Image (cartoon, rainbow, N blue to C red):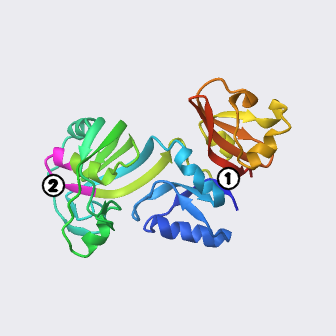
Amino acid sequence: MDCIFVANKPLFVSSNKFLNNLKKRDNVKKGGFSGILDPFACGALIVAYGQYTRLFSFINKEPKVYKATLWLGLKSDSLDIENIMGIYDTPKLSEARVQEVVESFCGEVKFTPPKFSAKKIEGKKAYELARAGEEVRLKEEVMKIFKIEFLGYNHPFVSFRVWVSAGSYIRSLGEMIAQKLGTFGALSYLERESEGGFKYEGQKHLNPLEILPFCKINARDLENGELYSKMINGKKLEAKELKIYKEGEYIVYFDEFFSIISYKNHAITYLLNRIPLC
């Protein structure tokens, strides 16, 4: 089976286990997903089967949109509700102050990823080292926050929605918001609402010709009898036979399959070839 769709990962299941459940349900051997979701998080997860797993690197997955709730006074090693160390009372703040702080996090923001994360240290995942009680030191990174929206404050809970770049950690953002409010905290809820505009809509299969951000060339319109044979065999192509006059990436499609090509420096190269069109 070759297909791509947006699934809705439930709470408290890892992305890998959720994918395995989907593969078992659909009797599929090869499958993959885009950006991983933490076990305690829920929401949109782009899933692909078969050869469509090769499309992930060509899909625009930004911005990623999350809805989160920050619990002020919650102490957690993983910055969420999975590794709670303690719950403490914190002073109630004015809603105006909380909103001001939340909305101050916009643009490029430096952060340190949580030690309970999939980041690798000398080939090992950080969360594996953390669970083993080993010291975890991760390098500071930068996330792009395109937009952040304050949703409400009902002490000790702060809710917000945020639009971020790939590789961002909302758990780290929650920690920084709490610190700027003069306290500490961790996320009690995290939902990914969309990735690059991809939302959960009942796991309907997506048309690759509609979701890939490239100009499309219908091979039928070219009236070139040799083109099918050349592309099915991955032979060299010329820009003039595809009527391409501008550098960039293109999709050339037939009834049965499509290919992604690149035209640069007067030469055409295959990025992906003979992907079944389902």
Q: Earlier in the sequence, mark 1 or mark 2?
A: 2
Report the disc number at residue 205. Answer: 1
Please state which amino acid type lies under the numbered disc 2: Thr
Tell me if residue 254 comes above or below residue 221 in the rendering. Answer: below
Residue 129 is inside the magenta segment: no
The residue identified by callout 2 is: 90
Residue found 26% across the figure and 40% down from its top: 109
Q: Secondary structure at mark 2?
A: loop
Q: From what the image shows, is residue 21 above or below residue 211?
A: below
The image position of residue 175, as x and y in percent, is 23, 52
Q: Which residue occupies 16% across, 62% down? A: 88
Q: Position of residue 200 (x, y in %)?
A: 57, 51
User: Which quadrant of the figure contains the N terminus?
Assistant: bottom right
Part of the protein shown in magenta: 178-186
Picture quadrant of residue 122? bottom left
Q: Secondary structure at mark 1?
A: loop
